[in-house]
Every structure is written in structure tokens, then in C-alpha cells.
Image: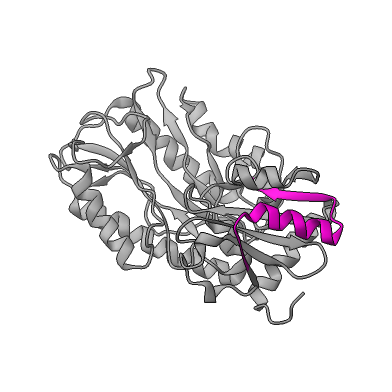
Amino acid sequence: MDTSLSTELAWRYANVRAAMAAHDLDALVVSGSEYSGFEGAVTYLSGFQIVHRYAYVVVPLAGEPCIVFPSEARYVGEHGTTEIEQVFADRPGEHIADRAREAGWKRVGVYGLDYIMAVRDYQALEGLELMPFDVEFDLARAVKSEAELDSVRDSVRINERGFEVFLEAYAPGKTAAEVMAAAEEWFVTEGCGRLTMNMVLTGTDAFARPEFKIARGEEILGEFLLPSLEVAGPGMHWVEVSRAIASGPAKLSADTERMLEAYGEYFEVAGSAMRPGASCHDVHRAVSEAFVSRGYHLGHVTGHSIGMTMIEFPKIGEGVENQLAENMVFSMHPHAIAPNGEDCLYMQETWLVTTDGGVPLSSLPMQVFRA
């Protein structure tokens, strides 16, 4: 490995190459695209943040990595931020295929084969044995370094204050757009840029429905809503922190009140359940019991690893046997839905796995905040 790499980037390459060796890969191609929101994987292995277009980081099992851009992407990002060789090619896939043939690579893993890699580049790799490597790559980066945890905590700080700004701006009768705009101004001011994905769940004055909505001007807010706030700060680590909001006099539905009780129980249980060595399946069962025992079902994954890509593997869910490890970070957000399919409760928290169990990284109590 090039000794000019920072300690942090060298640590990441060591983790990824260990996963590559375990799966007998000669090389790995990590795809990233601003178009689909999958920028983070490229940044993770190069230091470069995609501002427009797409790019690939090519990592041989032995030898120096490089980052390959389409020629038209020469000026759509701060190229001086990357620590590895940069290549500009009219067709990146053809360049990668040429490099593979010259090096004698046979078995090549691809992160982003299903959702990110451009068709023309996939076609150019014909003849190589391609292995989908999304899950394996995510597992290799699931344990965060101390530098990454600093970035995570900064994103939580920004997200938590953003929720407070949203709460301060909220009042029944306002539009979702004008209330979210106040929070978005804070997020952008703090360096999130375009890395925000903020929505609302609304319904009646007594309950919210399960569907996620873009915060538009025609959405008039009632006396109860569920903001869904997801941001990445300057370090590009995504987090999710939000709580339910109601006006002072709002009377919540009976199902919403019971779901709130279940949320309190989940929050208590998660601390002990999210311990190193526990399986994702067991954590899911432990934290979902409060909801299932009350007759509610979960309409969205209970939780998932989160990092430079918003949703990473492993997920906290049924049948997922991957084990938690110290310094993994998870977004937890049980999406509780009543049997009638109407009443819903959805609140987000970002958790850190420590030797003593799970620790919520925000200081917000798990409650409905009254405005």
C-alpha cells in the first residue's frame, strides 16, 4: 500500500482487502453515483466527494488503487481531496477492463452492481467473473474508526438541533414546506450541503398515517405529525434523529398512545440488547416485542447499519444472523402500524454499540414533544 495514504484511509483499505481475500477476489470495483445518492462508498475509499456524475474506486488485492471518472467529470468535484491515482476515461468500464486484462484479474467484486454501476461500464466488463459485493463491502466498513465516530457525533449534533429548529418553527396550519425549510436552513448552514433526506408523516389531529411524504407547500400540518429527519454533516456520515410532535391541546388516538408506551419499552430494551456478539435477528426480536405484543406490525425495517451511505448492511431484522460488534452504528426506527392500517408511530435514533451495550447518541428523550 502507498505509504502516502492517511492512517484512516489505510485502515479502511486493510478492512476491505481482508474481505476481498476471504472471498478470493483479485480486485474490487466500488461504484458511486451522485444521481442515486450512493456517493459515500467512493468517499470512503478515496476522500473524494462526488458533486455530479459518477465514479469508481478500483482496489486490487495487491497493488495501488485508483479512482476512475468519466471524462466529462473532470471539474465536478474537488479532485485535490483524493489520496489515490485519478483516471479520466471516456468509458470508465473499458479502462477498468483493460486494467483487469493487463493485471490478469479473473474474479472481480463489484459494490453497486444492482443499483449503481452504469450499463455501458457493466457491458465493458464482459469476460470477467463479476461477483456482487454490496453486503460484503458494507460488513467490511460496519465497524467505525474513532475518526468516523467523531464525524457521526457531529452529524448527530446537527440533526438533533435540526429537530429542535423544526419543533420551534412548527404550528398547526403551517405548511410542511415552511416548517422543514427552517430545519433545512440549519442543516445547510452547518455543512450538510445536499446530504439531507427529510420527510414528514401526517394524517389527522389524533394520529399520523404510515406513508412518508416530501415536505411540500400543499401539505398543511395538523396537530400531530412525525418528522423524519436524516442528514450527513461535513464528514459525510449519515444519521437519523427525530421524535413525534403534537400541539399542546392535541388528543392522540388510543393506538398512538399505546404505540408510545411500546416505544418507551423498546428504548429501554435496546440498551441491553444491542451488545457485541448479539445477532441482528435477536436484537430485532427484543426491540420489536413491545410492539408485536400489543398487536402492531412494523412496516419498515426495525433498524440498519448507517455510515457514509444512508442504509448499509447489516439490517436489524428477522433472520439476519450477523453479529453486532463494538463501534458499529445503527439507525433504529420501529415503524409501528395499527391493525387498521391507519395509526402509525415512527421515531428515529442513532445508536452506538459499546462493550456495555447500545448507547443512543442524541440526548432527546423518547417522547411526543408538545409544541
Q: Residue at x 47, y 42 (%)?
A: 333
Q: Is residue 314 visible?
A: no
Which residue of the protein is positioned furthest toward the top in this rendering? Answer: 340
In screen coordinates, is 342 left or right of 295?
left
Q: Is residue 111 visible?
A: yes
Q: Quadrant of the N terminus?
A: bottom right
Which residue of the protein is positioned furthest toward the bottom in this rendering? Answer: 4
Q: How many numbered circles does the render carry?
A: 0
Which residue of the protein is positioned furthest toward the left in this rendering? Answer: 173
As drawn, 369 above or below 258: below
Q: What sort of colour scheme is used for the picture?
A: one colour
Q: How far from the left and from the top, in percent, is residue 138? A: 65, 51
What is the quadrant of residue 220 in the picture?
Answer: top left
Q: Nearer the viewer, residue 323 or 162?
A: 162
Q: How far from the left and from the top, in percent, is residue 153? A: 47, 65
What is the quadrant of residue 65 in the picture?
Answer: bottom right
Q: Give the extent of the magenta segment.
A: 87-112
In screen coordinates, is 73 left or right of 254?
right
Q: Is residue 291 magenta?
A: no
Q: Nearer the viewer, residue 184 or 203?
A: 184
Q: Is residue 95 magenta?
A: yes
Q: Residue at x 48, y 67 (%)?
A: 235
What is the quadrant of residue 54 in the picture?
Answer: bottom right
Q: Residue at x 47, y 67 (%)?
A: 77
As drawn, 321 above or below 18: above
Q: Nearer the viewer, residue 266 or 302?
A: 302
Q: How far from the left and from the top, in percent, is residue 60? A: 78, 62
Q: How far from the left and from the top, in percent, is residue 296? A: 46, 25
Q: Nearer the viewer, residue 35 or 292?
A: 35
As drawn, 188 above or below 273: below
